[in-house]
Image (cartoon, helix red, strand yellow):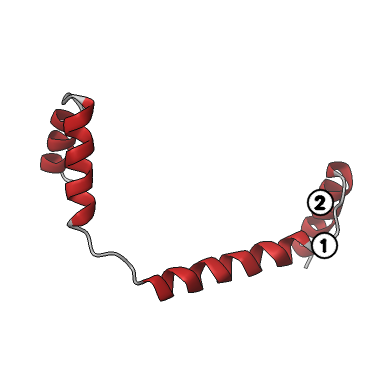
Amino acid sequence: MSSSAKKLLDEALTLPEADRRRLAEALLDSVPRRDAASTRRAWVQEARRRAEADQGESVDLDTAFADLRAQLRSSSSR
């Protein structure tokens, strides 16, 4: 954030809530929004990523650390 933007933000934060709300809405309206299709694609992609992560096998922390240490040892000995 530029110093002028930081100064503007600091000043804006001293405004009453109603003025901050109107200012925030005006600023958001000035920024181009992503089209609905690209937003939907991004959410579908994220949902798939999360579903794939949830399908993994759960392992207790001690086992996970032991496996990680073993992998690190084998990669450092190469």
Q: What residue lies at 15% left-to-right and 42% top-to-bottom? A: 5
Count the marks: 2
Which amino acid type is marked by label 1? Answer: Ser
Q: Secondary structure at mark 2?
A: helix
Residue 1 in sight here:
no
- Of marks 2 and 1, which one's residue comes earlier in the chain? 2
Tell me where residue 65 appears, x and y as whole percent. Answer: 82, 47
2 over 44 or under it: above or below: above
Which amino acid type is marked by label 2? Answer: Arg
Tell me where residue 46 appears, x and y as whole percent. Answer: 57, 65
Q: Quadrant of the C terminus?
A: bottom right
Crowding at label 2, few (<14), some or many (≥20) Cα neighbours within 10 Å? few
Q: Secondary structure at mark 1?
A: helix
Quarter where residue 36 is shown: bottom left
| Relative horizontal placement of residue 52, taking residue 25 as reference (left or right) | right
| Relative horizontal placement of residue 6, taking residue 64 as reference (left or right) | left
Tell me where residue 35 appears, x and y as whole percent. Answer: 34, 72
Decide which of 55, 26 is in the foreground and name it: 26
Q: What residue lies at 57% left-to-right and 71% top-to-bottom? A: 45
Tell me where residue 41 appears, x and y as whole percent. Answer: 49, 74
Q: Residues under labels 2 and 1: Cα distance? A: 9 Å
Q: What residue lies at 23% left-to-right and 52% top-to-bottom? A: 28
Q: What residue lies at 13% left-to-right and 29% top-to-bottom? A: 11
What residue is disc 2 on?
69
In the rendered structure, find residue 74 and report the number of the disc placed on it.
1
